[in-house]
Image (cartoon, rainbow, N blue to C red):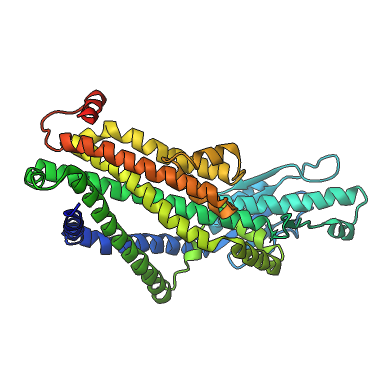
Amino acid sequence: MNHLPLIIKREYLTKVRNKSFVVMTFLSPLIMIGLIAVVAYLSQLNNDKQRSISVLDESGYLTDLFQNTETTTYNYLADIDLETAIALVKEREDYGLLHIGDALSSDNTPVHFKFYSKDSPSITVISSLESKIERRLREMKLQADGVSLEQIQSSKTQVNIGQESFEGEKSSKIDNIVKLAFGGMAGYLLFMFIIIYGNMIMRSVIEEKTSRIIEIIISSVKPVQLMLGKIIGTSLAGVTQFVIWILLGGVLIIVVTAIFGIDVSQLQTPQQDMVRQSIQSQDAQMIAENLLIAIGNLPIANLIVAFVFFFLGGYLLYSSLYAAIGAAVDNETDTQQFMLPIIMPLILAVYVGFFTVIEDPHGTVSTVFSFIPFTSPVVMLMRIPFGVPLWQQGLSLLLLIATFMFTVWIGAKIYRVGILMYGKKPSYKELFKWMKY
């Protein structure tokens, strides 16, 4: 293994000195932050858009319901029919016309509502109108049944069930959100790292194979050393690029928001906006306290150590498979038939993590998949914030390391034969034969 450090150094320097690598390292954050800034700016313009909505209330029950806001002005129309109202709204080029018919239900509440506009109205605007009308009609029906508004307000009760373990450790509903966020980010980061830099290793092997440089290198270096050197060297280059992305991205976000006055928080969907409004309606101090408790309950030290080991183990495991595929083919087009068996366990791990860990982190499905080496790096990282015994983490890591050593051994056999094979697209049957050599 004396040549391994030299191979690692060569592979690392070759990657970081490559012009495309340097350009994408500094250009990717610029493009990403630029896209986010543009979308946030456009969303901010859309949210600040002034709208004028006309209201024709023929029932007379909702004439005082809609109040003007910073971005929306309501104009009430009276003593005109619907056709005249539509013509008037067109002439004034209002955003739209809300028509409330004069037909009433058995409890004297309007039953006919329609919104007229030139273009399709915003989902947020329609949802806001519907929620206001629903709330008013609910109050009217309760009043018709003899219930006063004071009784309605006093009947509203907020229940917040406290959570505490048998050992006295306090938690809250927000704990699961914080834990899933930490675990999800760790798992998704590993998933993307494997996809991006695993493909880089595979392309590197294919390039050296097609250029015939590998024939010279292989004469003085064992195939397993060359494969490990490529994996580790490319991994170090990937870590370097990733660190630069984080640092440069953080600086660019601060610069963009400060210079151009763009509020990145404006980049939100109507669903996110509804969640934000729901959170604001609750006790902000209680939410802040629960958030601090949730962060305090996280096993930070365990998360950091486990992230490093499972991240490295999972990446090295899949990288050895990518390298073996690169050695078996002559071009990237031929790699497609071998990619599915590699990608499927990763996709399965992400789905299992997000759809089972949040509901039952210690259930049978979550536990089993956190021990399977091809899914454990993602699933176990998502389980650890919920509290996983150290013996389970250790056993999962040992299985991962053992599987990595086995895949390196298998990959080296494919690498040794395939690296010098040209002009033929191998099949799974031929790969199996190469493992026996």
Residue 350 left/right relative to 212: right
Residue 388 left/right relative to 314: right
Looking at the image, which is closer to me, 272 or 294?
294
Residue 412 left/right relative to 244: left
Whether residue 377 is visible to the viewer of this picture, yes or no, is no
Question: Which residue extends farthest right?
Answer: 146
How many circles with numbers are drawn on the protein? 0
Looking at the image, which is closer to me, 365 or 331?
365
**Quadrant of the rendering where the C terminus is positioned:** top left
Question: Which residue extends farthest bottom?
Answer: 259
Q: Position of residue 100 (x, y in %)?
A: 71, 48
Q: Position of residue 214 (x, y in %)?
A: 10, 44
Q: Identify the image quadrant of residue 92.
A: bottom right
Q: Position of residue 73 (x, y in %)?
A: 62, 63
Q: Residue at x 78, y 56 (%)?
A: 159
Looking at the image, which is closer to me, 29 or 355?
355
Q: Position of residue 217 (x, y in %)?
A: 10, 47
Looking at the image, which is closer to me, 275 or 417?
417
Q: Residue at x 41, y 54 (%)?
A: 309
Q: Residue at x 29, y 55 (%)?
A: 235
Question: Which residue extends farthest top?
Answer: 429
The image shows residue 81, relative to residue 268, as above or below, that is above
Whether residue 54 is visible to the viewer of this picture, yes or no, is yes
Q: Residue at x 19, y 28 (%)?
A: 426
Q: Identify the image quadrant of residue 170.
A: bottom right
